[in-house]
Image (cartoon, rainbow, N blue to C red):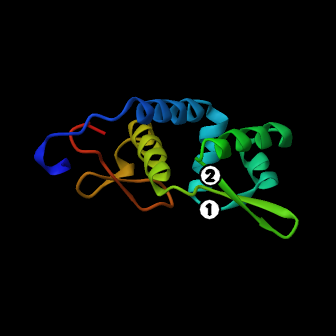
Amino acid sequence: MAGSGQYEKPSGEVLGRAAEAFGLLAAPARLHIVWLLAHGERDVSALAEQVGGALPAVSQHLSKLKLAGLVRSRREGRRQVYYVGDPGVVAVVRLMIGQLAEQEQGPEYRQGHGQVYERGAGPVRRLRGTGA
């Protein structure tokens, strides 16, 4: 009942899974990986290069993200290609990073009516009633 102002209380299991997902995204390297994957599929070598981490470390981060269901992969020949399989995760990551970038960079990130545009990305909707 999102429109009525009343919300169902989430179960303890849902809150636990959400806390676990946010905990995984709390590591800057993993957040960077999800951010990159939100903008396109990549293999572990490309991710390691762009994140600036060692291949084994990035691979370990990907394994944790994959176990949590935040990242998925598929085989392309000899390569394993990673992507974010849940659009909701992409929206949360873009919203948070877009908000912080807007605060840091100033008004050039803000355009239109309550929409934030990251460089090279589309609009990110703000969450009602959160100030975000």
Question: Residue 73 location in percent, x, y?
Answer: 70, 58
SS under mark 1:
loop
Q: Is residue 5 left or right of residue 72?
A: left
Question: Residue 60 location in percent, x, y?
Answer: 77, 38
Which residue sits at x=29%, y=45%? Answer: 127
Which residue sits at x=73%, y=48%? Answer: 50
Mark 1 and 2 residues: CB-CB less than 8 Å, in contact? yes
Question: Residue 130 location in percent, x, y?
Answer: 26, 36
Residue in the foreground of this view, choosing between 105 and 50? 50
Q: Is residue 52 left or right of residue 31?
A: right
Q: Is 45 drawn above or below residue 51 in the view shown? A: below
- Amino acid at circle 2: Leu
Please tell me how many numbered marks the rendered image carries.
2
Q: Which mark is residue 6?
A: none
Quadrant of the image occupied by residue 132: top left
SS under mark 2:
helix
Which residue sits at x=78%, y=46%? Answer: 48
Tell me if mark 1 has few (under 14), some (14-19) or many (20+) residues whose alpha carbon lies within 10 angstroms of its own: few
Question: Residue 117 location in percent, x, y?
Answer: 40, 55
Residue in the foreground of this view, choosing between 125 and 109? 125
Q: Is 92 drawn above or below residue 21 in the view shown? A: below
Which residue is situated farthest in the left direction here? 4
Q: Which mark is residue 36?
A: 2
- Amino acid at circle 1: Gly
Tell me if mark 2 has few (under 14), some (14-19) or many (20+) residues whose alpha carbon lies within 10 angstroms of its own: some
Q: Is residue 116 left or right of residue 57?
A: left
Which residue sits at x=41%, y=31%? Answer: 15
Q: Which mark is residue 40?
A: 1
